[in-house]
Amino acid sequence: MQNGPKWAIGGTLVFLAVIGVRVGMIYRERNAAEKTVAAPAREKIADDDLVFLKKKRQSSMADTKELVGQPLWVSAGGQMEYYPANGKHIDYAKADGTLLGAEKLEVKGFTEQVAPKSATHRIPGGDRQVLMLFSMPNSPAPEKVYGVPVGYHENGLYTFYLDEIFFYDDPHELYKHWGPEIWKAVDSHQVILGMNERQVQMALGQVSKSLSNDYGNRLVVYANLGKPFAVTFVKNKVTAFRPDQGF
């Protein structure tokens, strides 16, 4: 009988000791200085990606009226052929040229016309194409009016590509951070060392090809309106360029 109380007392002491240790640990945890957790570093967003590009999403001919009398600037450089216009009639027989990146246009109106198959390479023909009538204020013939396909009508519905073809605001202001040297090269449709892919695309056009998908670290060959040009990018900067015959 004497051993029983001793074991009971011993067990109680062990139990109290364990509780005391646990309480002490909780006390230290609650009263210890809070550890500062370093916030994860935010990924730096390139200035180009911060530029806001307007979208108007036209769905009817009525939606195009707000653009008449307004300037637009070419975004899809090197892709869209334009044709001579006589009033609202477009002469598809022979293209007068191809719109170049950042080129300024003055919108004169919109018209619809059945397009030959030869004029449906970029914009579908549908049952009739929608063409934008425009002049080129910075060209040798600023009063001349042309037409360029910007959409089509089919099965009672219109589809427009104005948002993809044009800037609604002057890209020289949107990308003002490029600086005068880069813009001089872009406006003269040339390449200089240090340009990034977006800048070269604006200068030489969007028609290009590359064997790599590693944007900013690759060799890109630009069609450049029939005068192919190969440009090498490292860390999204031009490091070399040359004429190319392999397009």
Image: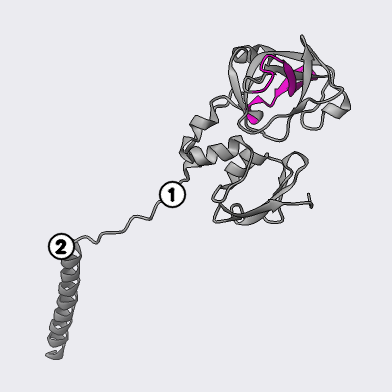
Residue 19 found in image quarter:
bottom left
**The one of 112 and 12 positioned closer to us in this rendering:** 112
Is 130 situated left or right of 93 in this image? left
Percent x, y of residue 191: 61, 45
User: Are the residues flagged by discs 2 and 1 in contact, CB closer than 8 Å?
Assistant: no
Asked whether residue 153 is drawn in magenta, I would say yes
Q: Which residues are magenta?
A: 139-164
What residue does disc 1 label? 44
Task: Identify the residue at image location x=16%, y=65%.
Answer: 27
Residue 119 left/right relative to 164: right
Check the image and report above or below for 89 versus 23. above
198 or 172, which lies in front? 172
Query: Measured along the vertical axis of the image, is residue 129 above or below residue 222?
Result: above
Kind of residue sitting beneath label 2: Asn
Q: Which residue is mark 2?
A: 31
Numbered label attached to residue 183: none
Residue 151 covered by magenta stretch: yes
Check disc 2 and report its element: helix, strand or loop.
helix
- Mark 2, Cα crowd under 10 Å, few <14 / some 14-19 / many 20+, is few
Count of numbered marks: 2
| Residue 232 is at least partly visible in this image | no
Q: Does residue 120 sit above or below 184 in this rendering?
A: above
Q: Given the image, on which type of amino acid does mark 1 rest? A: Lys
Residue 52: x %, y % from top left? 50, 32
Q: CA distance from mark 2 to mark 1?
A: 38 Å
- Percent of width and height locating residue 174: 50, 32
Q: Could you tell which of marks 2 and 1 lies nearer the N-terminus?
A: 2
